[in-house]
Image (spheres, helix red, strand yellow):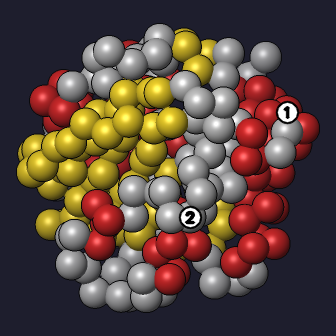
């Protein structure tokens, strides 16, 4: 089964507030983006956005140039119903995706850790570098070294912040460990790396 079929099946058959990665609007880690002090019109792309409330939170913080990218049409259709045309929506596989314009921020919560093959990580790194504006940032959140090895029926890589900076060939500016509590009450440790181009 392809990744697109896998994720389309999940997004089209389940209530989003029941999936393990779900966060309510007040729970998303938007503070990491706000702390970068970008201008409201700075181009931001949310990679693997699904039907996440991140773009809703960023709209509430005054950001106006937002793109939500995901491999699932069903996921982005849910987002469209919430935010209308305030956010650009792009259906794409991250391994084939480069932004139309250079972005000030590439945000990825829990996509990169599903790329367990070196060839896929190489494609991701290339596309990330092609998409980032000079002086741009990437915020990458993956399972921490003590995090799960599987998620949503797929294997996942685990990283420290230093490992993320190394594999993505970016400079580590800041890192945090945060815990995500799933709707079922399980705790998932995450590494968050704020990286500079």
Return the residue found at the far right: 13
Q: Quadrant of residue 38?
A: bottom left
Q: Quadrant of residue 176?
A: top left
Q: Is residue 77 above or below residue 2?
A: below
Query: Which residue matches tag 1?
Result: 9
Q: Write the residue at 29% across / 17% down.
A: 145
Quadrant where the C terminus is found in the figure? bottom left
Spatial distance from mark 1 to mark 2, Cα to Cα? 24 Å
Mark 1 vs mark 2: give the one in front.
2
Return the residue found at the far front: 185
Q: Which SS class for mark 1? A: helix
Percent of width and height locating residue 59: 51, 81
Q: Which of 18 and 36 lies nearest the eye of the viewer?
A: 18
Q: Write the residue at 56% across / 64% down.
A: 25
Q: Is residue 30 above or below residue 121?
A: below
Q: Which of 104 and 27 lies nearest the eye of the viewer?
A: 27
Q: Write the residue at 74% across / 39% down.
A: 18
């Amino acid at each position: 089964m392809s990744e697109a079929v896998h994720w389309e099946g999940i997004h089209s058959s389940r209530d989003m507030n029941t999936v393990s990665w779900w966060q309510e609007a007040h729970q998303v880690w938007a503070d990491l983006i706000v702390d970068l002090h970008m201008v409201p019109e700075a181009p931001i792309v949310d990679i693997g956005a699904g039907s996440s409330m991140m773009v809703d939170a960023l709209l509430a913080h005054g950001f106006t140039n937002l793109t939500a990218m995901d491999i699932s049409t069903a996921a982005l259709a849910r987002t469209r119903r919430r935010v209308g045309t305030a956010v650009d929506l792009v259906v794409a596989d991250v391994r084939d995706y480069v932004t139309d314009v250079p972005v000030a921020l590439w945000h990825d919560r829990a996509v990169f850790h599903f790329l367990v093959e070196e060839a896929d990580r190489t494609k991701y790194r290339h596309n990330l570098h092609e998409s980032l504006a000079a002086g741009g940032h990437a915020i990458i959140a993956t399972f921490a070294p003590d995090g799960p090895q599987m998620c949503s029926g797929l294997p996942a890589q685990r990283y420290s912040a230093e490992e993320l900076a190394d594999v993505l060939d970016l400079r580590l500016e800041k890192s945090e460990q945060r815990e995500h509590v799933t709707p079922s009450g399980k705790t998932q440790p995450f590494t968050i790396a704020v990286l500079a181009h």
